[in-house]
Image (cartoon, helix red, strand yellow):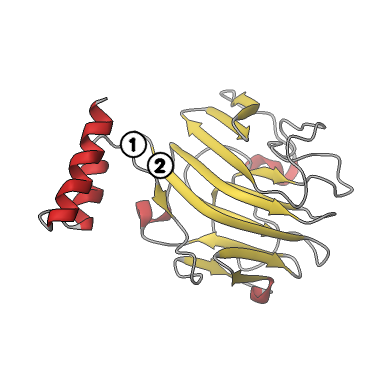
Amino acid sequence: MMKLRLNYMIILLLCLGICTPSLAQEMKSNDGSAWISLFNGKDLEGWKVGVNASTFSVEDGTIKVDGERAHLFYAGDVENHQFQNFEFKAKVMTKPGANSGIYFHTKYQEDGWPLYGYEAQVNNSQGDWKRTGSLYGIVDIKENYARDNEWYTEYIKVEGKRIIIKINDIVVVDYTEPEKPFREGDGIYRVLSTGTFALQGHDPGSIVFYKDIMVRPLP
């Protein structure tokens, strides 16, 4: 009820010209619960990509992924693109046979598969059996919780050593990283620390769309 009254007051003040939109945003975020957009829907400002940059484009208010292997890293001002504890969500739509992913706690790389951090899988029908929502290579799921050609929401939460991934509000991964996680080879870098987000362009046969990319930093 308190939240409804606050929202009503903001709208009333805006209509009267007493409250500016920036003040309204500040009022809404006083409790620290506001979601912050990482994508403006117009261009890739605040994002950075190395090789095969043409894999990423903006189409009808979405980030379209279509082309050779590439990774688009968030490099904007929010939290100076260094996130530790957070909630993240994005709306995603895959075309048949598409493979992609959302990296977190990662670092910018000019080329190659991101070495640092974890990947939340995006794959509803491609040959790799690890399906959408998998914490790739750590907690892999075989079930499909989303379908091609339909928008779904992928949610990631990191708090301390705990990672939760939801697909359309269904928890598909609830993983707590152990004190000394067992990793082999380059996997030694698949650990929680701090870092940014990255969207994956997997291969020329994978077409994926992302929109409403949001983050909510946690204490």
Disc 2 on helix, strand or loop?
strand
Res. 30 visible in picture: no
Give the number of the disc on residue 33: 1
Please state which of residues 176 and 25 is positioned toward the viewer in this rendering: 25
Kindly indicate the quadrant of the structure image that contains residue 134. Answer: top right
Q: Which is nearer the N-term, disc 2 or disc 1?
A: 1
What's the distance in space between the residues labelled 2 and 1, CA to CA?
7 Å
Q: Residue type at mark 2: give it.
A: Arg
Determine if residue 8 is in view.
Answer: yes
**x, y (%) of residue 7?**
25, 39
Number of labels in the image equals 2
Q: Are marks 2 and 1 in contact (CB under 8 Å)?
A: yes
Q: Nearer the viewer, residue 72 or 160?
A: 72
Residue type (three-letter) at the residue carrying disc 1: Ser
Please, is residue 3 above or below residue 21 in the view?
above
Locate residue 88, reporting x and y percent: 50, 42
Quarter-of-image position of residue 191: top right
> 134 or 166, which lies in front?
166
Left or right, residue 195 beside residue 217: right
Q: Is 24 drawn above or below residue 171 in the view shown?
A: below
View extreme (right): residue = 127
Q: Identify residue for label 2.
A: 216
Considering the image in quadrants, where does the C terminus appear?
top left
- Asked if 69 appears above or below 132 in the picture, the reply is below
Residue at (27%, 31%) from the top-left corner?
3
Specify the label residue 123 is tagged with.
Answer: none
What's the residue at 76%, 33% (across, down)? 140
